[in-house]
């Protein structure tokens, strides 16, 4: 398509698909909704409610019984695994036992009867997760399952393993509330966490609060998610968080840009990136100019990390297209992590729209799974 009638100003980038400069497109909610066949915007809008519902489902569902839990292992892939990372980050300052996340076919050797394995799969048919579930059964681990159904539910029902059944009909990555929050309920029931409901309430309120400024109806000039998509457009996002607090959000931004916008993105954490990645910002200059860095900040970041971020920003800014800082909001860690994620989730869907990409379907994942099933 050739856009003959474009009259944008000098600084505006023309989107060749829409014959519209990208800023006008980001302010045209009906145009944006048209490309979103699976209603990813709707799912995002429903996230605060989803979190509330997910807690209720978790509390109302059966939970495993165990006398001693010495460690927790969440097993899952992709959109179903990120809840494990959220749990690990959330639990590290609150729980007396460690949480590990397994994204593989194999259950770690240390897992035994005192290991609580939470097998999470939205579809219930992910082969890596089914494989670890079976190994956990054989090792007599304490198990809980979070799923909409599929083979995982069938096996768990047959084995008498408690299933937290969550609603279907969403893309897994649009169901993080359902995939993560019931695990918190399991922790609370097993006495590993307490008073989580207070943080769930705060989470819901904080998400509602920031939602007003990041939906398609909110204008670009007030909308941090749209502004971020504008920076990402035509560039490669590199997201940096801090180990233990915002790192999981950085990982999520990367995954969401990949799956929603079908575009590359990379992530890393402070302080580790100061010991390697940052050194690699000298050449090739023309490619470095195509990077846009996002630094995710949180009041819980270690003081030295805050200082590192400040110095690092100055170094990176010399060679990349730009650096955006996004700060979490809220009091509790749950709300703080999720508010960052919420902005990134919306930004990734806006980026999809800018590229004229339908954010919902992930045909490559579907293709891979079907190829694997046939072999
Ligand atoms: O977002 C996605 O669709 C993927 O990352 C899936 O979550 C991943 O392939 C695992 O599938 P499931 O969540 O059904 O176990």
Image (cartoon, rainbow, N blue to C red):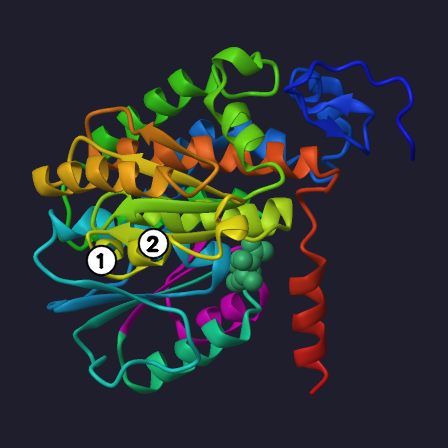
- 35 sits left or right of 296 in the view: right
Residue 56 magenta-highlighted: no
| Residue at the (53%, 32%) spot, across then down | 231
Location of the C terminus (image quadrant): bottom right
Q: Identify the mark at residue 268; answer none if there is no mark.
A: 2
Label 2 secondary element: strand
Q: Alpha-carbon neighbours of circle 2 within 10 Å: few (<14), some, or many (≥20)?
A: many
User: What segment carries the magenta color?
Assistant: 142-167
Which one is nearer the viewer's eye here, 27 or 279? 279
The answer to which of 102 and 278 lies nearer the viewer is 278
Query: Residue 75 occupies which quadrant of the picture?
Result: bottom left
Question: In the picture provided, is 11 more to the left or to the right than 289?
Answer: right
State the CA–CA distance, disc 2 to disc 1: 8 Å
Q: Which mark is residue 272?
A: 1
In the displayed structure, does residue 113 sit left or right of residue 256? left
Image quadrant occupied by the N terminus: top right
């Amino acid at each position: 398509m050739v856009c003959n009638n474009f009259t944008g100003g000098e600084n505006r980038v023309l989107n060749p698909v829409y014959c519209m400069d990208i800023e006008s497109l980001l302010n045209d909610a009906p145009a944006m909704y048209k490309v979103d066949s699976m209603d990813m915007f709707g799912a995002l809008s429903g996230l605060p409610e989803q979190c509330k519902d997910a807690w209720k489902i978790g509390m109302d569902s059966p939970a495993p019984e165990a006398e001693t839990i010495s460690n927790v292992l969440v097993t899952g892939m992709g959109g179903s695994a990120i809840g494990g990372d959220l749990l690990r980050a959330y639990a590290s300052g609150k729980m007396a036992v460690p949480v590990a996340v397994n994204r593989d076919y194999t259950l770690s050797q240390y897992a035994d009867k005192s290991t609580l394995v939470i097998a999470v799969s939205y579809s219930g048919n992910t082969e890596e997760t089914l494989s670890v579930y079976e190994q956990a059964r054989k090792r007599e681990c304490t198990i809980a399952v979070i799923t909409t159904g599929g083979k995982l539910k069938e096996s768990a029902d047959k084995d008498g393993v408690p299933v937290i059944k969550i609603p279907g009909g969403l893309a897994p990555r649009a169901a993080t509330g359902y995939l993560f929050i019931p695990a918190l309920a399991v922790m609370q029931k097993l006495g590993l966490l307490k008073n989580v409901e207070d943080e769930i309430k705060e989470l819901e309120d904080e998400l509602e609060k920031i939602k007003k400024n990041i939906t398609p109806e909110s204008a670009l000039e007030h909308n941090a998610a749209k502004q971020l998509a504008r920076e990402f457009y035509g560039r490669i996002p590199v997201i940096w968080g801090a180990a233990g607090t915002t790192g999981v959000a950085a990982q999520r931004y990367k995954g969401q840009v990949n799956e929603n916008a079908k575009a590359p993105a990379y992530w890393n954490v402070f302080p580790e990136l100061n010991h390697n990645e940052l050194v690699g910002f000298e050449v090739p200059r023309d490619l470095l100019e195509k990077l846009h860095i996002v630094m995710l900040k949180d009041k819980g970041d270690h003081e030295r990390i805050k200082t590192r971020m400040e110095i690092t920003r100055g170094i990176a800014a010399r060679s990349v297209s730009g650096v955006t800082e996004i700060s979490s909001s809220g009091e509790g860690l749950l709300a703080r992590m999720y508010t960052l994620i919420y902005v990134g989730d919306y930004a990734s869907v806006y980026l999809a729209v800018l590229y004229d990409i339908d954010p919902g379907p992930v045909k490559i994942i579907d293709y891979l799974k079907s190829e694997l099933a046939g072999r």
